Image (cartoon, rainbow, N blue to C red):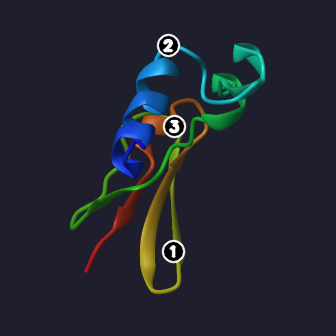
Amino acid sequence: MLSLVKVFTLLIRSNANKPLFNASPSLYKPVVGLLYQPLRTFKVRTAVKCYCKDCYMVRRKGRVYVYCKSNGKHKQRQGR
């Protein structure tokens, strides 16, 4: 009689090249477009400044924020 370890070893070796699930590969591959959503977060700086003519400053919650209508990279938040 085979030991339990040998049975599992033979089972793993016989199924090494088979997929783990019976589903087709297209069903368990992630859809990249739905998972990644670009988002511009604020750069945290001690001194914020406007970089272009579309940048404007707003004071909220005791902090100064810089927003930009034309370029999302200009978004900044004043740190403490």
Q: Nearer the viewer, mark 1 or mark 2?
A: 2
Q: Residue at x 42, y 71 (%)?
A: 64
Q: Name the mark on residue 5.
A: none
Occupied quadrant, residue 44: bottom left
Query: x and y percent of residue 11 in the render?
Result: 49, 31
* In front of the other: 36 or 54: 36
Q: Amino acid at mark 2?
A: Asn
First in sequence: mark 1 or mark 2?
2
Occupied quadrant, residue 73: top left
- Element on which disc 1 rests: strand
Q: Residue at x 40, y 42 (%)?
A: 2
Q: Is residue 71 above or below residue 58?
A: above
Query: x and y percent of residue 76 in the render?
Result: 39, 55
Q: Residue at x 46, y 64 (%)?
A: 65
Residue position for label 2: 17
Label 1: how many residues lie within 10 Å, few (<14), some (14-19) or many (20+)?
few
Query: x and y percent of residue 27 in the render?
Result: 77, 23
Q: Is residue 1 above or below residue 16?
A: below
Q: Is residue 74 left or right of residue 67?
A: left
Q: Are marks 1 and 3 in contact (CB under 8 Å)?
A: no
Q: CA distance from mark 1 to mark 2?
A: 60 Å
Q: Is residue 63 above or below residue 67?
A: below
Q: Amino acid at mark 3?
A: Gly
- Element on which disc 3 rests: helix
First in sequence: mark 2 or mark 3?
2
| Picture quarter with the N terminus | top left
Residue position for label 3: 72
Residue position for label 1: 59
* In front of the other: 34 or 5: 5
Q: Residue at x 39, y 63 (%)?
A: 77
- Element on which disc 2 rests: loop
Query: x and y percent of residue 41 in the render?
Result: 47, 51
